[in-house]
Amino acid sequence: MAEDWDNIILLSADALRADHLSCHGYHRETSPVLDELADESLHFTNAYSASSHTREAVPALLTGEYPDTAVGPDYRLATDTIASTLSEHGFATGGFHSNPFISRAYGFDRGFDEFNDDLHFGKHKLIALAQRALDKLRNRHYARAEEINERSLSWIDSLDDDQPFFLWNHYMDTHGPYEPPGEYEQLYHVEELSGRDAQSLYRRAIKDPDSITEKEQKLLIALYDAEIRYNDERIGEFLESLRERELLERSLLIFTADHGDAFGEHGYYEHPRYLHDEIIHVPLMVRPPGGADDEVSIPASTLDIAATVEQSVATSSDHDGTSLLGSFEEDRTVFMQARGEDDESHVRRYALRTREGACFCERDQETEALSFTDCTSRSLRNELEAHVEARMGRENGDDVADTGDVDEEIDRRLEALGYKE
């Protein structure tokens, strides 16, 4: 299928849950651009992330391997990504984002010719210090979508006309704290809220979810939905730029998210290490040149993206996904997993989804005991138990370690994003 397109473009949004898009039946019109994209794509309506948080979800997305082998105990990338594969096949490779957890500090620049993670490693120290001071003054903690678009389009324009490329843009706008800019700030609510107040509310929702009132919950959702609308329009601008460059019809375009965000449905906000639908059900659209028009309800996984890309360059794949351009069995099962939080580092959670049901369990890595929390049927429990047993011998290491030496800028960004107190 390689002759059908020259380029491969992967667009992903951080913390974008599927059921808040209007093409998934949401009551607000949050995503007119993505709605249109869905209409001209293979639209997988039951797609699930391989994990519920960036540190395991993005590695799975980029490698096609489950998190237990895609990253090591320190969350550093442990295997090659689709960027490495495509680079070996003559593609120029570019990645653009501003999430510290998937930065070059954790090895995610592997295989990319150009990798802009919005950090200042290796840059002139005075320039870096000045940028940090400016970021702090304006309460900036990630690059907005228009910045990601500008940087990635500039890179595309620097390539030779006949150079095939792989581009990955990862947008942070739908990640908390929810601070929609300008006209979007009050798109779905009337209350004025400063950026610092929005950040404070978001942090409290994470730390003390029981303190969030119904009014505050609605405010958080309104701000999140406005971020979706803002990001949707920026994606529209990016797609229009591709059309102007006559690149869209020469490219395989994939859109997805690394995970979703919760708003108290199971007693928590944001995206802790659980596997409920609100944080693992993600959008997934695959648009070949000329478009497609097929809504697919068979379960799919973000693991399938790497298999799809590798098929496009006619390479065999030994990863855990299945090409999204192939045919699926009607009763397909997809699996996901998440390592426990720091105080539960000995726990790994697993789940499966089929068309008909779901099953969840936890494994204590110290005792190897399995605890099933909710299963639709006994057969699904048996299937999940067999899957966990197969994974146990493959995971990277037993002990969860942190990187220890965290760059000052990464530490500041993580704090602003709600990961640190």
Image: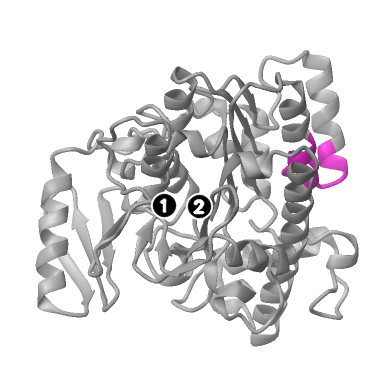
Q: Amino acid at mark 1?
A: Thr
Residues under numbered marks 1 and 2 in contact, where contact means CB atoms less than 8 Å apart: yes
Identified at 35% across, 48% down, the residue is 323
Nearer-the-camera pick, 208 or 75: 75
Magenta stretch contains residue 234? no
C-alpha separation, residue under disc 1 versus residue under disc 2: 8 Å
Percent coordinates x, y for residue 135 in the rendering: 82, 38
* Numbered disc 1: secondary structure: loop
Q: Which residue is mark 1?
A: 302
Q: Is residue 95 above or below residue 195?
A: above
* Numbered disc 2: secondary structure: loop
Nearer-the-camera pick, 345 or 316: 316
Q: Which of marks 2 and 1 precedes in the sequence?
A: 2
Residue 144 visible? The answer is no
Q: Which residues are magenta?
A: 135-150
Magenta stretch contains residue 145? yes
Q: Which mark is residue 67?
A: none
Count the marks. 2
Task: Classify mark 2: residues with Cα within 10 Å, few (<14), some (14-19) or many (20+).
Answer: many
Task: Classify mark 1: residues with Cα within 10 Å, few (<14), some (14-19) or many (20+).
Answer: many
Q: Which residue is mark 2?
A: 258
Q: Is residue 367 above or below residue 215?
A: above
Percent coordinates x, y for residue 395 in the rendering: 22, 38
Percent coordinates x, y for residue 411 in the rendering: 62, 36
Quadrant into which the N terminus falls: top left
